[in-house]
């Protein structure tokens, strides 16, 4: 079996254009992948098209060789943009291999480790940044059976905040905790907003609400800053979604201060790279909660990954809180029942693209999350 072509498709989700791929073979089997990257959908798509000729004629079973061809051979460092393009192809290869062998992807990596996957809700707080709004929405989400909710209460904060903004963020967290009670985990999203001093202040202030983690409070580019916050924080720090190679994880792991890691398969160049990182983390007694804030193909890919990881912690879910049409662009997409995901036993990813429905929702340039602009929580995109 040989790779014959790679094609791309774009869906105009209002808060992030989704980039999908389909890799074809000479035996008629094809696989699907995803390369979504916030503002850079067209850029990653161009990278997919430039890289694809390097692998035409190769076997889809040679995942390591294909990845080397796509990552090493261009002899350039494109970080998340480069890796997202590669991941969109690499994920599709695993889909092909699964279909060819009649197995879900997790069975190709040692089998399923969990009967089902605990999920946490994200994207549920689309609306005004008011404590009462967050509380009402949180109560609704917990009512669906979710035992964990993630949210960013910090508005458009960057580096430092005023006392009023500091207190508003705490009021939002308090309102959510009151709304859902003591047994639902709160995951506080930092979006790399703060400097070390501000992050440490927030970590100390939110500890009384007993969050399960404080995520990416400082930028990932300075590992020393992450380490300093983690050492000062009474709340577990979660990080890793922005890393683009395993060497960054190795450096952070060497400090032994982080135990919750969030590898993003797209930013790392694919599923197998993320699976390797999970094993590195396991060697340091850490747990894995992969970043899965892209589109529905990435959700399905992360479910395959998580099913195979003994140190899996929790699965991120946006899908239930997207616009209704978005369920129609995928066949057999991920479903959450009472806060858990049932693991598919269908071959490969177990899903497919609905190309006709995707075509009804074209790319729009303004579709992205402007995380440092007031009101970004509305997730309006460009209409």
Image: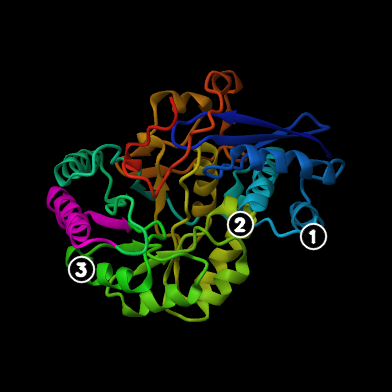
Left or right side of 299 for 377 = left
Q: Where does the N terminus fall, quadrant-wise?
A: top right
Picture residue at 31% right of the left edge, 41% below the top: 375
According to the picture, the residue beneath numbered tag 3 turns out to be 205
Q: What residue sits 56% from the left and 67% below the top?
A: 279
Q: Is residue 289 left or right of residue 172?
A: right
| Dot 2 crowding, Cα within 10 Å, few <14, some 14–19, many 20+ | many
Left or right: where 364 falls relative to 166: right
Can you tell which quarter of the image residue 29 is in?
top right
Q: Is residue 196 above or below residue 97?
A: below
Q: Please provide percent x and percent y for residue 196.
A: 37, 73
User: Eyeballing the image, is 26 above or below 164?
Assistant: above
User: Which residue is at 14% across, 48% downward?
Assistant: 179
Q: Which residues are magenta?
A: 161-188
| Secondary structure of the residue carrying numbered label 2 | helix
The residue to which callout 2 is attached is: 268
Image depth: mark 2 or mark 1 in front: 1
Distance from Cα at disc 2 to Cα at disc 1: 16 Å
Judging from the image, the colouring scheme is: rainbow
Look at the numbered disc 3 and give the secondary structure of its residue.
helix
Residue 182 included in the magenta stretch of the image: yes
Q: How far apart in space, not on screen, are marks 1 and 3 (Cα)?
A: 46 Å
- In the image as oriented, which residue stretches furthest toward the front? 162
Per the image, the residue denoted by label 1 is: 75
Quadrant of the rendering where the C terminus is positioned: top left
- Residue situated in front as seen by the camera: 98 or 227: 227
Residue 355 is covered by the magenta coloring: no
Q: Secondary structure at mark 1?
A: loop
């Amino acid at each position: 079996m040989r790779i014959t072509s790679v094609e791309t498709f774009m869906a105009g989700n209002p808060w992030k254009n989704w980039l999908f791929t389909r890799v074809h073979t000479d035996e008629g089997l094809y696989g699907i992948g995803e390369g979504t990257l916030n503002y850079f959908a067209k850029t990653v798509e161009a990278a997919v098209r430039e890289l694809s000729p390097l692998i035409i004629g190769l076997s889809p079973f040679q995942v390591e060789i294909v990845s080397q061809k796509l990552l090493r051979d261009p002899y350039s460092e494109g970080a998340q943009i480069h890796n997202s393009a590669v991941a969109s192809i690499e994920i599709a290869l695993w889909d092909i291999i699964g279909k060819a062998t009649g197995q879900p992807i997790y069975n190709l990596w040692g089998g399923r480790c969990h009967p089902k996957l605990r999920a946490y809700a994200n994207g549920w707080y689309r609306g005004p940044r008011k404590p009462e709004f967050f509380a009402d929405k949180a109560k609704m989400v917990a009512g669906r059976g979710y035992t964990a909710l993630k949210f960013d209460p910090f508005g458009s904060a960057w580096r430092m905040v005023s006392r009023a903004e500091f207190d508003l963020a705490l009021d939002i967290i308090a309102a959510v905790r009151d709304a859902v009670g003591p047994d639902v985990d709160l995951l506080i999203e930092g979006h790399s907003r703060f400097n070390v001093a501000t992050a440490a202040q927030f970590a100390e202030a939110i500890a009384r609400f007993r969050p399960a983690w404080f995520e990416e409070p400082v930028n990932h580019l300075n590992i020393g800053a992450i380490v300093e916050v983690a050492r000062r924080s009474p709340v577990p720090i979660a990080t890793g979604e922005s890393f683009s190679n395993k060497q960054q994880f190795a450096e952070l792991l060497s400090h032994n201060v982080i135990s919750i890691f969030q590898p993003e398969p797209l930013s790392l160049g694919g599923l197998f790279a993320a699976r390797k990182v999970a094993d590195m983390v396991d060697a340091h007694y850490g747990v894995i909660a992969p970043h899965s804030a892209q589109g529905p193909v990435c959700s399905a890919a992360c479910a395959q990954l998580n099913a195979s990881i003994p140190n899996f912690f929790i699965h991120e879910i946006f899908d239930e809180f997207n616009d209704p049409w978005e369920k129609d662009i995928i066949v057999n997409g991920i479903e959450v029942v009472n806060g858990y995901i049932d693991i598919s036993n269908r071959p490969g990813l177990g899903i497919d693209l609905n190309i006709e429905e995707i075509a009804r929702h074209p790319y729009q340039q303004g579709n992205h999350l402007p995380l440092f602009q007031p009101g970004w929580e509305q997730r309006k995109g460009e209409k």
